[in-house]
Image: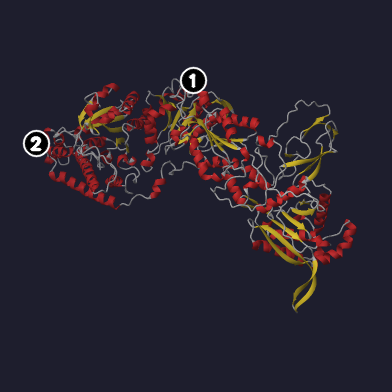
């Protein structure tokens, strides 16, 4: 199983494009793989003949697991036994893993030291390290699948859970899960979650369980942005082949505001805030109602408005055509989600873990605005939009977030965007 | 004490020499040294008595082993020692520590658990030590210090620096293994060490004769290590002094160790807790007639030293003991920071990083 | 870089220091003319002569007392106690005198001395010549306690012990004497109180001492190749001072501590390490602490019995595999 991204520890073989006996090459897709972050076609790592498939379609295995054997031209395959990856840390890691399950969304319990509740879903006591981690992160231990004996949760299971993937499958039978009451009949249609849906769901639950979310919003006057955008619109469309949206302007403003308020561009490591010097901007992209991905634009803070616009266009296009590579999901430091096309007023976004803040831009609509001038107040019609940021209250406080938002608004409202676009 | 140069005042006071003293005129010790020893005997006697008084006032805690009656052994040997020589003694070691020149307030303060104590209160009565005076420690486990004293002598031999090491111990020590190990190895290596058994006839509460195969617990063992049997009157400071001189001369000449049995008697019990009821009636009284302090007073008179001089020294010593008692009483308890000092040579106590 | 046996490293370490400092002297039973009953001190008499390298009678109290007396008056003696079991006959000198005199005298005495001794089992000598008693020394305040596992550590730590101003108990594991190892050329002086991480692994931290170190290393290989368990191995090297920083940081990384001790079970050094770990990094522990020890029995002599008694690489593997999940 190829490495699908730094924080991805397993992948599901969704389709085999070849069968045993077929010739394979580095130029042809061998199989499709999906994870919580990515769906991708994987070509054969070398030319030759597919002699064995070890992981059938639909099965999920850890990264590094051998999933098939390719015989190079002229090569003899002597060993048919499965080989194990030395990266894996226990025998359990070699066992195939079932698709991850989503715990019922309970509120995360307060886990106090020494309480009788310090047991996992299988009744095993929690180790001190696990107790500390679940308490620190406010996780319900029942949501973590344990890789130890009888499903005991180990420290690495919690860490894997925090990274978004189970460390390894438990040997014990899964504990009973609360599932929605099955509904059948002509009045309902049951649509099974696809892999991306499952991963998204799991990620969202985990994010909410991990980070205490606080939502803050400001209204911004997009008049200057709008003016510049309109002026450049025709030439842009002609030159670039697509329309210039508000999103690159917001992205540019965010990148600049981060310079003054870097703590929103960060992650939590234990009891420390790790603040990134560069902005790797994740852009939430809807896949035509069929899932949500957030590819990353690396070093967005070093890009011009033009470059940002092109990069956003590029990752959106590739997301919708399933052409994103694992690297496109790595190392994000801040996320912007844009629901604006549907004219929403405000969206409370869920933080893209392990980041600490996410901004939602919504519909920009004309509104009457009071303009304060030297000659007194006046009412004007201006394009106004809401910028809403959810932040992790462990990392920063409301005043800091508010100051950051105010700075973003200030940039949007006061920057000479026309000059920027020239 | 013991700071006056021995040769400085030779002949002084000869005009007062009595006819009896003339008969002893070929005296090898001399008045200056005798007065020095007199002062030493008195210092020990009065500090030990003061220690006993302070027990009764509950100012001295824990146990204590008084050397009342043993003064002449300490005085005779210490007076014969050179500066730089080493002495090692047992838990009954107040007298040996004082005799080497350690201060009275240092000794009394240590017994009282005060900051001014020789060991700042960290050792207590049984471990009096003053390395600067060559008093290399009081050892409270029977026998341990014989090999240690022998090791110091090894250093003197190896470096050729001329020191002699003297080790004082009781009659009970002659029955423990370390005694024999040290004697044998010191004899084989011809080390400059003098082993001095203070035979007071009791190992703690038991008469030494009841538990020892030979009559002289040290003297009769000497032959086993190729050493001459030396048994002396340990209550006569002059006899002790002369014996010490001979043994030190032998040691410094490279002729190896000596084992000396100095017979003496404890005027009090083994320790603070012991009323010494086990002694047969009349025994203490017989020994009190040989008390080394009055005996030496008489000896000085025999040599024609005036009562004024003799009593004057005693008054000085008593005043010193009073002053030392006041200093010790006024001294505060040791600071608690001492607890975490001096396990290691770096001054600290850390066993981990 | 020369290849020396563990026993040759003993003589090399002593010789290095005796050449450098004439105050270093060496005494013990059969150490001079015979070159030591384990041949660990061969050649020293020839090089340094009988004044500095002295045979003694069978008198352990005299040997250690002599070392103490010489140390307090300015020498840097090295004393050999032929078998560490014999420390019992001179323990007064070790525990009551050497260990305590500096503290009791308010710092008036300094005792720069080394007590070397052949420690531990594996040689079929029976219960009175095979004990692993470094924990006896560990529990006495005032003694530094070192137990090397390799030839290089023997030489470097012995030199450090001789130069140290405090009493050092130097436990040589007698079954390691024939073991060869690379020893750097030239003067070698290690640092007391430092543990060494010999192997990195993510799953479990094994702390071992002396002869248990090579066994722990072998066990770690087996754990990885046969069980997929990656073990960090820490050679504790020094019980006093104890390098708790290294031990704690390595246990934090894996969340699991295994001590491998040759001591009988009760109050082995691993119990203290376990206690420190439980005290200070409890919330980093990811499972119970595992102590692999000799059972609480006198060591039997027959090879079959002795081998079944001391922790072996197989037993270390077995106990970890059984208890790790």
- Chain under label 2? B
Q: What residue is pinned by disc 2?
A: B19
Q: Which mark is residue A394?
A: none
Q: Is residue C321 left or right of residue B259?
A: right
Residue C4 horizontal/vertical position (percent): 55, 25
Q: Secondary structure at mark 2?
A: helix
User: From what the image shows, is residue C199 above or below residue A388?
Assistant: above
Q: Label 1 lies in what chain?
A: C
Q: Between C17 and C136, which is closer to the camera in this rendering?
A: C136
Residue B2 vertical placement versus A258 (above, below): above
* Quadrant of image for the N terminus of chain A: top right
Q: From what the image shows, is residue B142 above or below residue A117?
A: above
Outermost residue, front direction?
A: A185
For residue C302, which numbered disc appears in the image? 1
Q: Nearer the viewer, residue B275 or B95?
A: B275
Question: In the rendering, at what x and y percent does residue A28 appear?
Answer: 85, 38
Q: Nearer the viewer, mark 1 or mark 2?
A: 1
Badge 2: how crowded within 10 Å, few (<14), some, or many (20+)? Answer: few
């Amino acid at each position: 199983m190829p490495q699908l991204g730094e924080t991805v520890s397993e992948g599901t073989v969704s389709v085999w494009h070849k069968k045993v006996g077929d010739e394979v090459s580095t130029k042809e897709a061998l199989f499709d793989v999906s994870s919580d972050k990515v769906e991708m076609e994987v070509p054969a790592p070398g030319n030759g003949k597919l002699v064995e498939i070890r992981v059938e379609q639909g099965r999920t295995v850890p990264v590094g697991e051998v999933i098939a054997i390719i015989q190079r031209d002229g090569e003899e395959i002597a060993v048919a036994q499965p080989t194990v990856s030395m990266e894996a840390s226990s025998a359990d890691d070699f066992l195939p893993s079932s698709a991850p399950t989503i715990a019922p969304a309970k509120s995360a319990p307060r886990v106090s030291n020494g309480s009788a509740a310090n047991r996992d879903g299988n009744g095993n006591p929690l180790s001190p390290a696990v107790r500390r981690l679940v308490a620190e992160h406010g996780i319900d231990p029942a949501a973590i699948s344990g890789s130890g004996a009888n499903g005991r949760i180990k420290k690495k299971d919690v860490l894997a859970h925090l990274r978004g993937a189970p460390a390894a499958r438990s040997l014990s039978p899964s504990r009973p899960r609360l599932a929605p009451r099955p509904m059948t009949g002509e009045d309902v249609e049951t649509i099974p979650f696809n892999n991306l849906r499952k991963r998204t769901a799991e990620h969202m639950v985990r994010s909410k369980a991990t980070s205490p979310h606080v939502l803050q919003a400001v209204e911004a006057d997009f008049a200057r942005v709008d003016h510049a955008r309109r002026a450049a619109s025709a030439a842009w469309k002609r030159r670039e082949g697509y329309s210039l949206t508000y999103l690159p302007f917001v992205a540019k403003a965010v990148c600049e505001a981060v310079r003054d308020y870097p703590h929103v561009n960060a992650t939590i490591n234990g009891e420390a805030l790790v603040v990134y010097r560069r902005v790797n901007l994740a852009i939430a992209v809807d896949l035509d109602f069929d899932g949500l991905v957030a590819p990353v634009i690396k070093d967005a803070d070093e890009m011009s408005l033009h470059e940002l616009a092109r990069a956003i266009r590029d990752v959106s296009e590739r997301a919708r055509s399933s052409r994103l590579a694992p690297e496109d999901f790595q190392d994000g430091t801040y996320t912007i989600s844009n629901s604006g096309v549907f004219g929403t007023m405000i969206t409370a976004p869920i933080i893209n873990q392990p980041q600490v803040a996410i901004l939602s831009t919504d519909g920009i609509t004309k509104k009457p605005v009071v303009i304060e001038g030297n000659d007194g107040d006046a009412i004007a019609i201006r394009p106004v939009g809401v910028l809403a940021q959810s932040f992790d209250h462990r990392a920063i406080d409301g005043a800091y977030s508010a100051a950051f938002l105010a700075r973003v608004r200030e940039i949007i409202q006061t920057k000479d965007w026309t000059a920027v676009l020239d | 004490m013991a700071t006056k140069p021995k040769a400085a005042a030779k002949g002084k006071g000869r005009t007062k020499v009595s006819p009896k003293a003339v008969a002893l005129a070929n005296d090898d010790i001399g008045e200056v040294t005798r007065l020095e020893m007199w002062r030493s005997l008195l210092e020990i006697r009065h500090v030990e008595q003061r220690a006993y008084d302070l027990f009764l006032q509950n100012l001295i805690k824990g146990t204590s082993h008084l050397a009342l009656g043993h003064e002449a052994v300490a005085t005779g040997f210490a007076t014969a020692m050179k500066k730089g020589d080493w002495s090692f003694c047992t838990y009954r070691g107040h007298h040996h520590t004082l005799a080497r020149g350690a201060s009275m307030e240092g000794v009394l303060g240590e017994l009282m658990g005060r900051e001014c104590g020789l060991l700042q209160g960290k050792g207590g009565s049984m471990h009096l030590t003053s390395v600067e005076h060559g008093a290399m420690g009081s050892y409270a486990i029977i026998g341990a210090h014989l090999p240690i004293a022998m090791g110091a002598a090894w250093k003197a031999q190896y470096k050729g620096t001329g020191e002699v090491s003297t080790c004082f111990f009781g009659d009970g020590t002659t029955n423990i293994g370390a005694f024999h190990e040290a004697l044998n190895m010191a004899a084989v290596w011809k080390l400059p060490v003098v082993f001095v058994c203070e035979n007071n006839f009791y190992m703690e509460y038991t008469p030494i004769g009841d538990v020892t195969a030979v009559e002289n617990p040290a003297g009769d063992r000497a032959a086993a290590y190729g050493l001459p049997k030396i048994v002396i009157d340990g209550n006569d400071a002059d006899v002790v002094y002369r014996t010490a001189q001979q043994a030190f001369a032998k040691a410094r000449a490279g002729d190896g160790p000596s084992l000396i049995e100095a017979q003496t008697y404890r005027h009090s019990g083994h320790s603070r807790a012991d009323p010494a009821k086990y002694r047969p009636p009349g025994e203490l009284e017989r020994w009190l007639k040989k008390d080394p302090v009055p005996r030496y007073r008489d000896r000085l008179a025999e040599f024609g030293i005036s009562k004024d001089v003799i009593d004057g020294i005693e008054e000085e010593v008593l005043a010193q003991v009073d002053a030392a008692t006041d200093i010790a009483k006024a001294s505060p308890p040791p600071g608690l920071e001492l607890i975490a000092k001096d396990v290691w040579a770096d001054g600290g106590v850390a066993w981990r990083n | 870089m020369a290849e020396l046996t563990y026993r040759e490293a003993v003589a090399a370490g002593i010789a290095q220091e005796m050449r450098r400092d004439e105050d270093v002297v060496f005494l013990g039973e059969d150490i001079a003319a015979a070159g030591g009953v384990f041949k660990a001190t061969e050649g020293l008499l020839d090089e340094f002569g009988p004044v500095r390298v002295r045979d003694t009678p069978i008198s352990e109290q005299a040997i250690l007392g002599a070392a103490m007396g010489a140390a307090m008056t300015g020498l840097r003696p090295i004393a050999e106690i032929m078998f560490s079991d014999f420390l019992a006959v001179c323990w007064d000198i070790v525990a009551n005198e050497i260990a305590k005199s500096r503290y009791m005298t308010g710092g008036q005495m300094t005792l720069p001395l080394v007590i070397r001794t052949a420690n531990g089992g594996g040689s079929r000598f029976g219960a009175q010549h095979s004990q692993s008693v470094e924990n006896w020394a560990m529990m006495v305040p005032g003694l530094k306690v070192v137990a090397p596992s390799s030839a290089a550590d023997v030489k470097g730590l012995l030199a450090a012990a001789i130069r140290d101003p405090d009493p050092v108990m130097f436990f040589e594991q007698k079954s390691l004497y024939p073991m060869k190892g690379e020893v750097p050329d030239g003067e070698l002086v290690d640092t007391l109180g430092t543990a060494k991480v010999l192997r990195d692994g993510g799953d479990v931290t094994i702390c071992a001492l002396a002869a248990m170190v090579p066994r722990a290393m072998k066990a770690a290989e087996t754990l990885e190749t046969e069980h997929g368990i990656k073990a960090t191995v820490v050679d504790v090297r020094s019980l006093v001072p104890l390098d708790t920083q290294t031990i704690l940081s390595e246990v934090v990384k894996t969340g699991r501590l295994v001590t491998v001790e040759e001591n009988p079970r009760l109050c082995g050094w691993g119990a203290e390490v376990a206690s420190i770990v439980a005290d200070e990094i409890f919330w980093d522990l990811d499972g119970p602490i595992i102590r692999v020890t000799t059972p609480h029995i006198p060591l039997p002599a027959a090879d079959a019995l002795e081998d079944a008694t001391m922790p072996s690489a197989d037993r270390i593997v077995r106990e970890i595999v059984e208890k790790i999940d």
